[in-house]
Amino acid sequence: MPIHGKIRLLLLCIAVVTAGAGNTYAGSKPNIVVVGGDFDPASVRHDSRIHARAASALSEQLHEAGFDIFDAADLQRRQKGAARRSDLDIVKAARKATRPPLDIVVIFSTYTKTRENDYGTWVGARVAGRMLNVRTGQLLATFELASPRLRRAPSNCTRSCLLEIVGREAQILARDMGAALAEKLIWVSDPGPATPRPSGKTLAAAPNGYALVLDGFTPEDITGIEEYLVVFRDYNRHRPVRVGARHHEFWYESGASSGRLYRNLKKMLSHMGMRGHIDFSGNVFTIAKIGPRAQRGFEKGDW
């Protein structure tokens, strides 16, 4: 079967797997992480350059479709003494992530195939995996694509040469896989009529992501603070990560630089009649409330 026919069949299989599953992310764009799974002893290890090329191609294709793809470095750690990582370990690690909170994890494995005969060495690749809802564990899609035919390696091809050929093949398959998954993610995120998108371009520039940690604020304080957060210039979206009686954490996305957001937060406290200490490190703003709250009116200023 031609590769394009396989992609169409893959899209159909994805639709069948998720039919009736509901649209958890309707109206919002999910945070996605792409992670290599290598628990199967027959799969290529995630630290192989073959696997790295496939991971980059898959992530880039989803990024070009306009989705937010986050680094999987914190999910790469294995249990002590384990050479390979299980899917369960990956999902558990994804659930613990809060900066940013993750919604969907794409776990994929790469496989190679080699055959030798009198005419030379023939090589190919296969990419397989699944897409999961991080919070519920719901299966959103399963996928698999393989080389339509094995490729003949040049004579006297060294190990490095073979790795290059197989890596290129895995990269091509992963890119096609990413295109199919992007179509599914568009349906999951917005099941309404599709809107035209520029071919090969992102929907918009990626916003900056910040963790806002608020200590000592009451729920009533937080309600007022959220009214300000959404009117700051270049606001994109925000979501609660942790909620308590006096401790709240938000993931906040904005086109604003860290300097402008810092100034806006200071002005916000002043307008609300509050005193607070603001610390910033990396991409984390920590705001600690000082003293009682004075009652003042809310005014939507030009931020």
Image (cartoon, grey):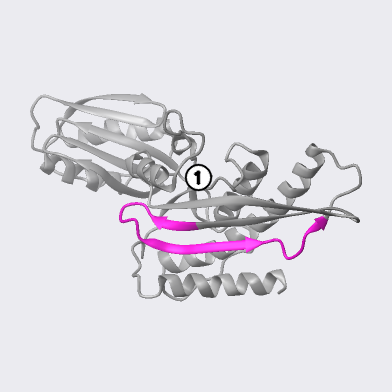
Task: Please provide percent x and percent y for residue 273.
Answer: 15, 33
Task: Please provide percent x and percent y for residue 176.
Answer: 64, 61
Bounds of the magenta segment = 130-151
Which residue does the image show at 41% across and 55% down from the upper left?
Answer: 30
The amino acid on which the numbered mark 1 sits, given as a three-letter code, is Phe
Image quarter (top left, top right, bottom left or bottom right) of the N terminus: bottom right
Which residue does the image show at 63% across and 51% down from the upper left?
Answer: 111
Does 176 sit above or below residue 41? below
Location of residue 301 (image quadrant): top left
80 sits left or right of 22 in the view = right
Which residue does the image show at 37% across and 59% down from the upper left?
Answer: 28
Task: Give the SS element for disc 1.
Answer: loop
Task: Please provide percent x and percent y for residue 44.
Answer: 61, 44
Does 43 sit above or below residue 271? below
Q: Nearer the viewer, residue 93 or 118?
A: 118
Is residue 103 in view? yes
Which residue is labeled 1 in the image? 39
Asked whether 218 falls inside the magenta stretch, the response is no
